[in-house]
Amino acid sequence: MLGNLMNALLQPGAGGQQSAGANMLSQVVGGLMGGGQQASGTPVGQMLGGLEQIIGGNPSSGQPLPLNQGTATSQNNPLMGLLGPVATAVAGKAGISPAVATTVAGIAMHYLLSSHPAAGGAAPLNLNNVAQQMASGSVSQQTLQSSGMVNAVVQATGLSQQDAAKSLDATFAHLQEAHVRNVKSGDQRAERRDKK
């Protein structure tokens, strides 16, 4: 599921097919959020709202975030199934608690999702640039700092700037691994279909 989401996020409008990328993202997000929910708003808007519940606010709004190290109410959030494995991996790589890693992963996902054309509004990240950086091994410190992501993690978790950057590096590395696994499994399925 994470791999499908990363595939939809990192290919927002290749070749001028922005609406196709938005439709793909909406389908993936709709599935994550429980399919045909009756809640108002788009699936992308619903996912952003769900991430904001976990984080404790909108990290790209410029407003201070409350110190949030994994609230009990977020356990009922359908996105915890998506963020849980990411948080576990990040906690191990960055040496932070799983609750703090959940907030870090939520902030990273919020920035990625709110930068997709389907989210509308001003994008805090250049998604094509971030996708290229992820493919080359890591997202630059300049991108993490200039987007406000590091400061959002510091505010929400109490981590130092250095630890916030380290935890974001671990998060993006895990997200890239999920994307690569998804692409490889899709290629393998295509090969099997072609052999039939």
Image (cartoon, rainbow, N blue to C red):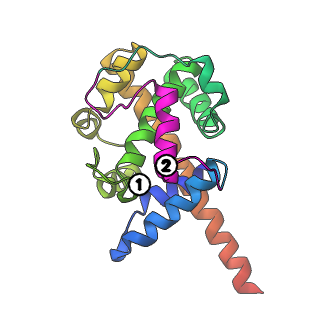
Q: Is residue 137 visible?
A: no
Q: Is residue 105 above or below residue 36?
A: above
Label 1 secondary element: helix
Q: CA distance from mark 1 to mark 2?
A: 7 Å
Residue for badge 1: 135
Q: Which span is picked out in magenta?
A: 36-63
Q: Quadrant of residue 66?
A: top left
Q: Quadrant of residue 151?
A: top left
| Label 1 vs 2, first from the N-terminus | 1
Q: Is residue 151 above or below residue 84?
A: above
Q: Residue at x 50, y 35 (%)?
A: 51
Q: Which one is nearer the viewer's eye here, 125 or 88?
A: 125
Q: Is residue 183 above or below residue 1?
A: below
Residue 87: image location, x then y, percent:
57, 30
Q: Which one is nearer the viewer's eye here, 180 or 119?
A: 119
**Position of the C terminus by quadrant:** bottom right
Magenta-colored stretch includes residue 43: yes
